[in-house]
Amino acid sequence: MPDLIERSADILARATSAVALTGAGISVESGIPPFRGKGGLWEKMDPMKVAHIDAFLEDPEGVWNLLIKDMKTVLDKARPNSGHTVLADLERLGILKTVITQNVDGLHQMAGNSDVIEFHGNFAWQRCLDCNRSIETSRVDLAQIPPRCRCGGILRPDCVFFGEMIPHEALIRSQKLSAACDVMLVIGTSAMVQPAATMPFIAKDNGAVIIEINPEPTPLTSRISNLPLLGNACSIMPRLAAAIRQRMPLPDNR
Ligand code: OAD
């Protein structure tokens, strides 16, 4: 493992257009549970019953009560961890160009990354099903479930439910950046959900080195990851940053 970290640091220190693909795992150590695996949300509930757009439209009250209300409580409290802050450092150093995230928690922006593609939308905003007006989630009154817009329409999170399209611009930019990057850092994703999971394949097909950080093997690990770093984001990312720091100065802001 130390050798894999050193080799990853060598490659990242020379990179100029790295892209990160992140998933729920990078936010686990910020107190946000993942979807799959140990302690995952989908162990406790069926995503087709709580995270599919048809389920939401059929029973918005039920989905707000079962999933969205708790998500708001958890996300309100969450703050970036060292996995997020190292990615922000890598951007400041000119190594990392963009973060493509499947997360809706806004923690990459909070950590300081300036180009974040929110592949599955953002929980910071709610949208009215009737008039399409947007309202910040922090301003939503949860006294009434489902919460309503001032026009009386039901509010939904501005996130991608199962059964919905990925925002067009997010998909096209992600495909282009994946094809053009020199390194892809894949952090904390089970790589089970399409089309996000195709990005590492696009990167690899176009010559990028794939560095994967995850405590568990994924479908990418034996197939395309050049450097699988087995471990939690908050354990691996600071070690990676320290190894890069030996090769170039990093802003010391942690
Ligand atoms: P998953 O919950 O499917 O996978 C989380 C991954 O993070 C797993 O591979 C874990 O092994 C890993 N992991 C756990 N703890 C970690 C840690 N401390 N550091 C690093 N990795 C850790 O999450 P995603 O791959 O993001 O979609 O799931 C993709 C999509 O499925 C989500 O965006 C969501 C979900 O259904 C929608 O809601 C549309």
Image (tube, rainbow, N blue to C red):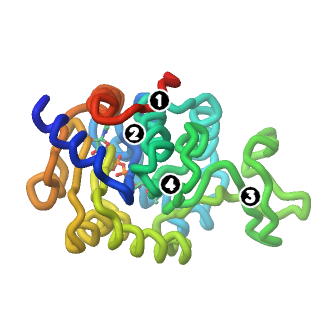
Say whether marks 2 and 3 touch (CB < 8 Å): no
Percent from the top left, x then y, of residue 209?
A: 21, 58
Q: Nearer the viewer, residue 175 or 66?
A: 175
Residue holding disc 4: 50
Say whether marks 1 and 2 touch (CB < 8 Å): yes
Q: Which marked residue is nearer to the observer: mark 2 or mark 3?
A: 2
Q: Which marked residue is nearer to the observer: mark 3 or mark 4?
A: 3
Residue holding disc 1: 81
Q: Is mark 2 within 8 Å of ligand 1?
A: yes
C-alpha separation, residue under disc 2 versus residue under disc 4 = 23 Å
Quarter of the image for residue 55 reads bottom right
Visible residue check, residue 15: yes
Residue holding disc 2: 26
Q: Earlier in the sequence, mark 1 or mark 4?
A: 4
Q: Earlier in the sequence, mark 3 or mark 1?
A: 1
Label 3, residues with CA under 10 Å away: few <14, some 14-19, many ≥20:
many
Label 2, residues with CA under 10 Å away: few <14, some 14-19, many ≥20:
many
Q: Secondary structure at mark 4?
A: helix
Amino acid type of the residue tagged 2 in the rendering: Ile
C-alpha separation, residue under disc 1 versus residue under disc 4 = 28 Å
